[in-house]
Amino acid sequence: EDQVTQSPEALRLQEGESSSLNCSYTVSGLRGLFWYRQDPGKGPEFLFTLYSAGEEKEKERLKATLTKKESFLHITAPKPEDSATYLCAVQAGTSYDKVIFGPGTSLSVIP
Amino acid sequence: NAGVTQTPKFQVLKTGQSMTLQCAQDMNHEYMSWYRQDPGMGLRLIHYSVGAGITDQGEVPNGYNVSRSTTEDFPLRLLSAAPSQTSVYFCASRFRDRSSYEQYFGPGTRLTVT
C-alpha cells in the first residue's frame, strides 16, 4: 500500500537553530515528491518538486533533498516567520493523477 | 489573478442537509481537485477532474458529487451531510502538463455537520 509518513510530528526550534524534517515514502513508481508549506487557516503553498534520487532544491533558508526512500527538508538558521506546517506529498504509480499527502510536521520557531 | 477561490469560508449544516461548496480558478488550469483535511491525517483526495466534462473519484468519494461544466469552476456537492463530513475542504488546481505538478490551493472551507 502506498504510504507517506513524516517526522517529527511537531518541532520547536530556537531562532537560528538549524534542523531537518523527514518524509518517508513507500510507493510504487515515484513520479515526483512535493513539499508544501501551510499556515494556520490557509491552504497549502507549493515549495518544491523533486523527481529523482540525489536531486536537491533550495529556496531561501529551505533545502529539500531526495533519496530512494525518503526526503529531507533542511531549515538553516530559521526565523519565526518560518513557523508553519510542512507537508510532504508524492505522485505515484500508474495513475497519473494520484497524489498522496503525509500528515505534516508542525514547526515552531521561537525568537 | 485571483488564483483559486472558494466559497463559503465557513458553513454549519445539520445532518441530512445538502449543500454545494464552490471552487473557481482563473489560471486556465486543466486539472482541478477537492481534498479534505482532518486533524492528524494528510490531505485526502475526494474527486478530481482533468478537464471540462471529465471527473473521477479519488480516495474518499462517498457522499460527495462533482461536475465540471467549465474549465474555471469545480463545485463539490454534499448530498446528505453526515457528522463524519465535518472537515476542512480544499480545492486545488494545476496544469496537466507532466513537466510540472505544482498545485495551487484555495483558502479552504471549514464545514461543521451537527
Image (spheres, coloured by chain):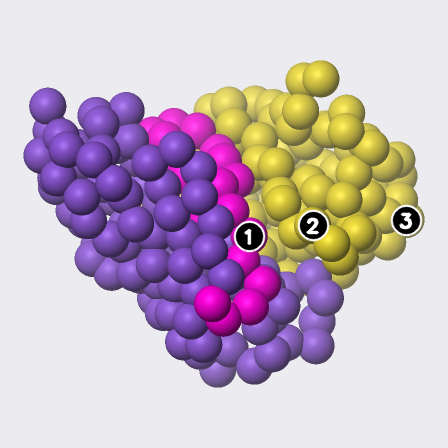
Chain colours: A purple, B yellow
Above-or-below relation of A48 to A39: below
- At which x and y percent is residue A95? 70, 71
Q: Residue at x 90, y 49 (%)?
A: B53
The boundaries of the magenta stretch are: A35-54
Of B10 and A47, the residue lying toward us: A47
Q: Which mark is residue B100?
A: 2
Q: Identify the residue position indicated by label 1 in the image.
A: A49
**Residues tagged 1 and 3 counted as in contact (Cβ below 8 A):** no
**Residues tagged 1 and 2 counted as in contact (Cβ below 8 A):** yes
Of A14 and B91, the residue lying toward us: A14
Residue B79 appears in the picture as rendered: no
Work out how far the residue at label 1 is from the one at label 3, CA to CA, in angstroms.
29 Å
Above-or-below relation of A34 to B71: below
Q: Identify the residue position indicated by label 3 in the image.
A: B53
Q: Residue at x 27, y 54 (%)?
A: A21
Q: Is residue B25 magenta?
A: no
Chain ID for label 1?
A: A
Chain ID for label 2?
A: B
Q: Which residue type does callout 3 highlight?
A: Gly
